[in-house]
Image: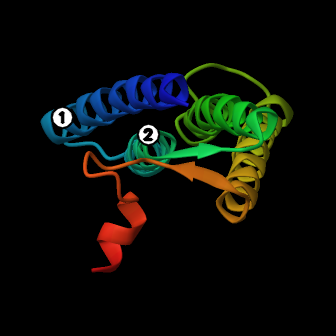
Amino acid sequence: MKHYSTILLRFSAFFALLGAVIGSHMAGAGGYEFKTVHAHILVVGWLSLFAFAVFYKLFTPANRMLAAIHVWSTIVGTFGLTIGMWLYFVRPFNIGDTFTTSFFIIGGTVLLISFVFFFILTFMKTGELEHSTGSRLSDNCRN
């Protein structure tokens, strides 16, 4: 699962940088038309993907297929939600309301489903990271 952790960490870094650039742009321009997109890029794109990266670094889900679906639906859903939100709120192009609303809803739905997959994964059997002393990391956290 180290591979999933690395993928999610890199996408998290991408969204962190993108969110910081958008925030910097808003501060410099004095306009806040990107505030909703900015907030979701940072919360969903940066923080959620980072938390998922940590999960896959610490745990190895027994169900590899569900883990793969979770990782890729998270990435696709995050892009879909944030791009859809940008199209919907900022309206940078003359695209019809049906398309922008559908894009926004579909991206958000894929992301919501990815959170359901993560919820399920947390209740399934996982292999936990072993500490160098041989004791389980979770045992050390209880002390």
Which color mode does the image show? Answer: rainbow
Q: Quadrant of the N terminus?
A: top right
Q: Residue furthest bottom?
A: 143
Q: Position of residue 115 (x, y in %)?
A: 68, 54
The three-letter amino acid code for the residue at tag 1 is: Ser
Q: Residues within 10 Å of mark 1 (few under 14, many from 20)?
A: few
**Above or below 128: residue 141:** below
| Residue under pointer 1 | 24
Q: Position of residue 75 (x, y in %)?
A: 61, 30
Rendered position, 134 above or below 4: below
22 horizontally vs 94: left or right: left
Q: Nearer the viewer, mark 1 or mark 2?
A: 2
Residue nearer the viewer, 132 or 20? 132
* Residue 47 or residue 121, whichever sits in front: 121
Query: What residue did someone put label 2 on?
Result: 57
The residue shown at (61%, 19%) is 93
Q: Quadrant of the C terminus?
A: bottom left
Residue at point 63%, 52% (across, down):
126
**Residue drawn at 72 percent across, 34 percent down:** 73
The residue type indicated by label 2 comes to Lys
Label 1, label 2: how many angstroms apart (C-alpha)? 31 Å
Please indicate whether residue 82 sits to the left or right of residue 45 in the image. Answer: right
**Local secondary structure at mark 1:** helix
Residue 95 visible in this rendered orientation of the protein = yes
Q: How many marks?
A: 2
